[in-house]
Amino acid sequence: MAQQLAIIVLVDIGNALEANTLRDNVYLFDNMKLHGSEGQGTGDLVTAIHGAYWRDGSQATEQVLNWLPYSLGSLPPTVPRGYESERSLQSDARALEELDALTAKPDATDPAADLNEIRKAVGTRVKTTRRTKGRLSGQKVIDLTGEIVTDTSAGTYSYPAPVITDIYGQAVDEKIMYPAEYGSPDLVTDGWYWSATVDSSRPGTYSYSMRIQLHRLVQRGSEALWEPVNMTCESALRVTSEPKFNGFTGSGMGLLPIEPSLSSLSSAPGAEYFQQSGTQQSGTQQPGLAEEER
């Protein structure tokens, strides 16, 4: 059975957009640190892939990789799926209440100022475009605490999670791994994730690249848009290979060494000696035993 290996791609989106590069703004982790992976928590991760082969040289175990992108400094992916929509509805309901209270005031001196405050409390709803469908469609901008952002120029808002759009490079060109995007019921990844099967029968170090899409909030007139920005980062696989061995004995594949039972000892050569030295001859009494115990 193939082994499952997770690679976390953690992106500092704010700094990456400001520097226009993922260099020094992406942190990679996997769960093979104790098995030889290097560069954990940096942008230079080298993932250890342990392959194995049978006695005839054929591949015994393959590896399956799963990439999971996350955003540093954004709402955690563990919040409920409809959290952003719920916060948007709450802000709309609060604005309607304030509007009703304003219209009920008989002596409103400056209704324009009050309306402006209500407009700020409603927040900014991002316009839906063809390139920002799905989870980004029509949502309001919120900050890390879940509050509606009234001033997007401050930059204190939660970015959408990064999206891996392609995996390519040496490891793919030389057919060391076969990546593809798959559908999944996991709502954390919006129903999609990247996975790859690795040919672990070819030892060596192979590089690969990931194309990652981030989103920058831009203001165009009175409209706010999430503008996609494509960047790339590199990583590598180090494939090692060794013969398949028995996990219990540490030796080659085969039957487990099981201790022989007493019944099998009776028919084994030299059994008569063990019977005479290890048991009491009939007709003799063992000291210290009562009659009923003999």
Image (cartoon, rainbow, N blue to C red):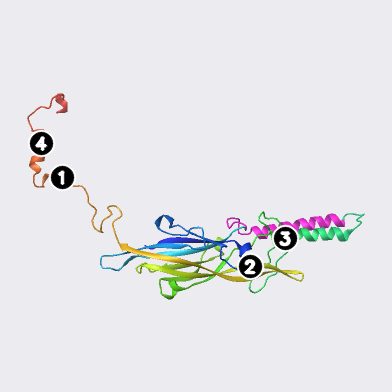
* 10 Å crowding of disc 1: few (<14), some (14-19), many (20+): few
Q: Residue 61: where, in percent of width, then height?
A: 35, 64
Compared across the picture, whether 70 is left or right of 175 comes to: right
In-front residue for pair 167/239: 239
Whole-angstrom CA distance, mark 3 to mark 1, is 83 Å
Quadrant containing the C terminus is top left
Q: Secondary structure at mark 3?
A: helix
Whole-angstrom CA distance, mark 1 to mark 2, is 74 Å
Amino acid at circle 3: Ala
Q: Which residue is mark 3?
A: 154
- Please report the residue visible at 73 percent of the width from the left and 57 percent of the height from the top: 91
Q: Residue 128: where, in percent of width, then height?
A: 68, 70
In primary-sequence order, the first of circles 3 and 2 is 3
In-front residue for pair 35/71: 35
Q: Secondary structure at mark 2?
A: strand
Amino acid at circle 4: Ser
**Does 265 appear above or below 223?**
above
Whole-angstrom CA distance, mark 2 to mark 4, is 84 Å
Q: Are marks 3 and 1 in contact (CB under 8 Å)?
A: no
- Please report the residue visible at 45 percent of the width from the left and 68 percent of the height from the top: 196
Q: Are marks 4 and 3 in contact (CB under 8 Å)?
A: no
Amino acid at circle 2: His
Q: Which residue is mark 4?
A: 277
Q: Which residue is mark 1?
A: 263
Q: Which residue is mark 2?
A: 215
In primary-sequence order, the first of circles 2 and 4 is 2
Q: Secondary structure at mark 1?
A: helix
Q: Is residue 100 magenta?
A: yes
Q: For the magenta stretch, what is the residue range?
A: 74-103
